[in-house]
Image: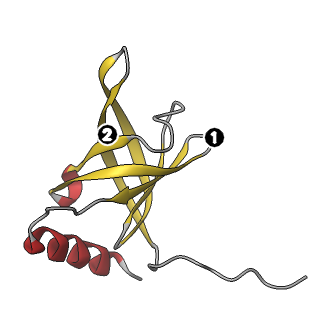
Amino acid sequence: MKPRLDSRRYHRSPAKAYVDLYWEARGRGMLFERAYCLDVSEGGLRLRLPGGGPPVGTSLNVRIDAFGFAEFGVVRYAHPSGILGVEFRFEGAASEQVDRWRKIVRSLRP
């Protein structure tokens, strides 16, 4: 069997922090869920949620108090086990915000 090639754009670094997620669900209004961050990359986060969480394609407001960071993202991966992949949008974000996130991610690299 051939080894699987990693097609990710960014290196993932382990991270241990709680993440607050806010999103709007049709007919249910604004929802909140606290997730546990498993790892980070320059493009986003991989999280574990106690519940199912929002479906793929959902726009989120992501706040990570441990890093003093907040950004908008979109759910790119959702597994029934509660693992969620969130990609940051950085659309319209100031370059300082993007640079700040990159510094946070680099500081977590082993």
Horizontal arrangement in the rendering, residue 49 relative to residue 42 (left or right): right
Q: How many marks?
A: 2
Kind of residue at disc 1: Ser
Q: Quadrant of the N terminus?
A: bottom right
For image coordinates 63% across by 40% down, the residue present is 81
The residue tagged 1 is 81
Check disc 1 and report its element: helix, strand or loop. loop
The spot of residue 94 in percent (x, y) is 8, 68
Check disc 2 and report its element: helix, strand or loop. strand
Q: CA distance from mark 1 to mark 2?
A: 17 Å
Q: Is residue 45 above or below residue 29?
A: below
Determine crowd level at label 1: few under 14, some 14-19, many 20+ residues with C-alpha closer than 10 A.
few
Tag on residue 10?
none
Closer-to-camera residue (22/90): 90
Horizontal arrangement in the rendering, residue 89 relative to residue 37 (left or right): left
Q: Is residue 45 above or below residue 41?
A: above
The spot of residue 110 in percent (x, y) is 41, 83
Tag on residue 21?
2
For image coordinates 34% across by 73% down, the residue present is 42
The spot of residue 101 in percent (x, y) is 22, 70
Determine crowd level at label 2: few under 14, some 14-19, many 20+ residues with C-alpha closer than 10 A.
many
For image coordinates 30% across by 74% down, the residue present is 105
For image coordinates 35% across by 36% down, the residue present is 34
Kind of residue at disc 2: Leu
In the picture as drawn, the residue positioned furthest to the top comes out as 27
